[in-house]
Image: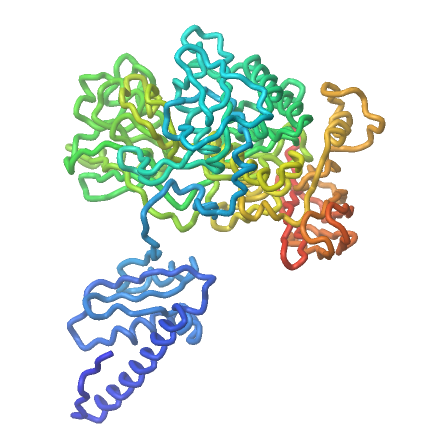
């Protein structure tokens, strides 16, 4: 570091100069130490850049100013620990490790232009598996993985996709008992080893995917690595599944009109007999009693044969009690985001820029076009319907070369049909659009309307989407269906969350990427969002666990993934709403690598489920068991939940049994993280094992004062031996009497 020569022309100036000299030396020492030891010592915080614009021309010490800013927000010693480096030769900025709250405080300081996270730039891949801490070079048991068969019950598959090439594959596993009955012009290979179809539609008489959905989900679970996959340049990188060496058997149950129960049961019937190991079904509906639910029925019989079924929770959020996958033997998956967020921007004629989430591959080349509200372009509709841009409500002559503003999230469908240049819709839109379009929050949508009302010539531009890094991820998706479980109130659903927002994966080239009639684009890879995308992530993770533990039961694999799930930060991603928290994400965010060594398992057998069903007076699946005592609350489930009455003191007990799969000679101690409104105790508070697969039982007791309103209270039980941390969510909740 260079210093100017000091000019002692005045005592005060001299004193100031000496002080600055020692400050510079002190800061240089800090920088030197930081450089030697890899930066700040506080690794729990994220690295941010604090940008302050150009260097002032007046007498100015950037180092002292940077440190003083940090000291205003942090303690003096903490400021030294936080500081990483100063940029002071060509511009004015510094780097520091900050918490979320600290970076917000610094951003509000005078002279600070912006504060943003320091990104790690690299060649990009399809981010979801890397984001889950599951890189390409993760340890694998490839021989066993290649023998795993994932049954994909969906809309079929596009067999010619690079994601399903069989180059390098040997013959199907000897255990495979299925067939390739894919219909006209459909050929299986050593990757897609089986295909069947069940739809009665004459236009859907093959297992070939004409919707794109089935190819997408299959490639997420078990697709090959495909370099350079992208959607019109967006999300460019390597597309791959969770278990790329695994085999796929496809069962087409869906046609243009949907997926029927009879097709679903036919697919389960065949898949079980064919010898699949894992079933993934990204199909859901409103919750129904188990004995009226084709997926609950089919998956029960799959469980009997040692096959785990993974199902999407549904896309009916954010409303409570909408989760459609409710049976305890099903693995129910919610959707959350990754650290890759795809955004587009609306630039108004007044210079204001609004940022939102639609996947827009179109560019207007910097040109702004007239804006028009739906009600001002109506054709034979009421103002209310035209405002929503309802079907056939827009006059094509009035929207030509204009951007239509609609008060409905799917208004872009009608704007596209009517021939509008673009659309601005209400509500965040995570999906691919067929024209330049952006879905805005209600606040930003109101800003657009206010701008239109403020001028005689409103104009705007919609900028092509781009990918940015979202350091707040994972966040649960607003569309993901929520608990509580409306069929069995003592079973927490959904079970877990996984990436389901902006997922790039294989697609059918004959399907519209936006599903809009008239969108003639053809793509090999598409970006989709939904619990349909999160479900095959967990199916791939389950197959990965099974490749290390082929003889574990479906409930054991499920337990391993739930108890090792990453905790979601509720304060960051929720405002404490009843339908959020565990009702949104279950046990947490899936973490496949940890799940192969969970330490303890909560295992359950067919008999355990049958006892639970008999306690609910559901008598469908099996003959009456010898002992019918039990309740859903006491099912040996990795989570614990109870519905308590408003106005009644809380007194609930859960009985659980864990199986040791960690170290033969080990002791686990219990730790409770509880809400102040309840007391949680565990007896015994520690459990010791001498053998692998030894079992130990314990009782969890929850007590507390009466609750006076509809609410959800959360806690966690963690068993730890110092190496493994086996975590279970505990949820107490109330409902209004009329619910």
Q: Residue shown at 19%/20% (left/top)?
A: 398
Residue 126 visible in the current orientation:
yes
Image spot of residue 477 (x, y percent): 46, 38
Image spot of residue 95 (x, y percent): 33, 65
Does residue 96 appear left or right of residue 222 in this picture?
A: left
Image spot of residue 381 (x, y percent): 30, 14
Image-quadrant location for residue 233: top left
Q: Residue shown at 48%/35% (left/top)?
A: 245
Image spot of residue 34 (x, y percent): 38, 72
Does residue 134 appear left or right of residue 691 in this picture?
A: left
Does residue 175 appear left or right of residue 441 in this picture?
A: right
Residue 232 lies, with reference to residue 275, above or below; the image says below
Image-quadrant location for residue 365: top left
115 or 257, which lies in front? 257
49 or 36, which lies in front? 36
326 or 411, which lies in front? 326
Q: Residue shown at 52%/40% (left/top)?
A: 142
Residue 584 visible in the current orientation:
no
Coloring scheme of the render?
Answer: rainbow
Does residue 426 appear left or right of residue 618 in this picture?
A: left
Residue 660 lies, with reference to residue 166, above or below; the image says below
454 or 144, which lies in front? 144
Question: Quarter holding the C terminus?
Answer: top right
Q: Report the residue that reaches farthest toward the right.
A: 626
Image-quadrant location for residue 375: top left
Q: Residue shown at 18%/21% (left/top)?
A: 400
């Amino acid at each position: 570091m260079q210093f100017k020569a000091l000019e002692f022309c005045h005592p005060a100036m001299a004193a100031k100069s000496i002080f600055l000299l020692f400050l510079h030396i002190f800061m240089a020492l800090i920088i030197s130490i930081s450089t030697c030891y890899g930066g700040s010592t506080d690794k729990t915080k994220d690295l941010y850049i604090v940008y302050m614009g150009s260097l002032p021309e007046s007498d100015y010490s950037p180092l002292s100013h940077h440190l003083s800013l940090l000291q205003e927000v942090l303690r003096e010693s903490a400021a030294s620990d936080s500081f990483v480096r100063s940029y002071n030769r060509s511009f004015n900025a510094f780097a520091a490790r900050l918490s979320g709250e600290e970076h917000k405080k610094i951003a509000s300081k005078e002279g600070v232009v912006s504060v943003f996270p320091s990104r790690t730039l690299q060649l990009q891949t399809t981010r979801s598996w890397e984001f889950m801490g599951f890189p390409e070079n993760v340890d694998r048991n490839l021989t066993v993985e290649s023998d795993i068969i994932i049954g994909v019950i969906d809309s079929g598959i596009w067999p010619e996709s690079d994601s399903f090439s069989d180059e390098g594959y040997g013959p199907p596993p000897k255990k495979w008992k299925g067939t390739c009955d894919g219909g006209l012009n459909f050929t299986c290979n050593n990757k897609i080893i089986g295909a069947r179809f069940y739809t009665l539609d004459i236009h859907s008489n093959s297992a070939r995917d004409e919707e794109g959905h089935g190819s997408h989900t299959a490639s997420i679970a078990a697709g090959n690595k495909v370099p350079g996959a992208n959607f019109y340049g967006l999300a460019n990188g390597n597309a791959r599944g969770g278990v790329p060496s695994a085999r796929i058997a496809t069962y087409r149950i869906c046609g243009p009109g949907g997926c029927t129960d009879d097709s679903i049961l036919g697919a389960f019937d065949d898949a079980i007999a064919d010898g699949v190991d894992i079933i993934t079904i990204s199909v859901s509906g409103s919750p129904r009693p188990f004995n009226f639910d084709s997926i609950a029925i089919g998956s029960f019989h799959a469980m009997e044969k040692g096959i785990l079924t993974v199902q999407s929770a549904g896309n009916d959020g954010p409303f409570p009690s909408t989760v459609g996958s409710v049976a305890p033997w099903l693995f129910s998956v919610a959707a959350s985001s990754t650290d890759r967020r795809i955004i587009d921007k609306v630039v108004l004629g007044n210079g204001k820029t609004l940022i939102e989430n639609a996947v827009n591959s179109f560019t207007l080349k910097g040109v702004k076009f007239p804006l028009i509200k739906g009600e001002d372009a109506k054709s034979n509709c009421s103002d209310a319907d035209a405002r929503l841009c309802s079907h056939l409500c827009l006059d094509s002559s009035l929207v030509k070369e204009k951007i239509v503003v609609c008060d409905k999230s799917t208004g872009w469908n009608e704007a596209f049909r009517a021939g509008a240049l673009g659309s601005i819709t209400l509500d965040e839109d995570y999906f691919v659009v067929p024209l330049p379009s952006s879905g805005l929050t209600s606040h930003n949508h109101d800003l657009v309307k206010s701008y239109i009302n403020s001028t005689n010539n409103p104009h705007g531009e919609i900028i092509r989407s781009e990918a940015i890094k979202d350091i707040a991820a994972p966040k649960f998706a607003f569309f993901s269906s929520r608990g509580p479980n409306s069929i069995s109130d003592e079973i927490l659903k959904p079970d877990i969350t996984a990436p389901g927002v902006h997922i790039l994966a294989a697609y059918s080239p004959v399907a519209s990427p936006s599903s809009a009639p008239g969108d003639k684009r053809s793509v090999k890879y598409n970006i989709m969002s939904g619990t349909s995308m999160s479900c095959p992530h967990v199916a791939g993770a389950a197959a990965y666990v099974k490749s290390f533990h082929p003889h574990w039961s479906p409930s054991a694999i499920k337990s391993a993934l739930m108890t090792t799930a990453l905790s979601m930060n509720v304060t960051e991603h929720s405002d404490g709403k009843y339908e959020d928290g565990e009702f949104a994400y279950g046990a947490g965010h899936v973490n496949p690598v940890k799940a192969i060594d969970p330490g303890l398992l909560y295992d359950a057998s067919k008999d355990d489920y049958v006892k639970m069903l008999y306690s609910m007076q559901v008598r469908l699946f099996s003959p009456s068991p010898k002992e019918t005592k039990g309740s859903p609350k006491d099912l040996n489930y990795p989570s614990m939940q109870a519905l308590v009455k408003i106005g009644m003191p809380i007194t609930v007990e859960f009985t659980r049994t864990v199986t040791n799969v960690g170290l033969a000679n080990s002791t686990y101690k219990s730790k409770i993280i509880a809400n102040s409104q309840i007391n949680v105790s565990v007896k015994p508070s520690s459990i010791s094992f001498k053998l692998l697969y030894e079992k130990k039982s314990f009782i969890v007791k929850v007590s507390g004062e009466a609750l006076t309103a509809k609410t959800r209270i959360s806690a966690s039980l963690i068993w730890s031996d110092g190496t493994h941390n086996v975590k279970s969510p505990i949820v107490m909740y109330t409902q209004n009497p009329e619910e």
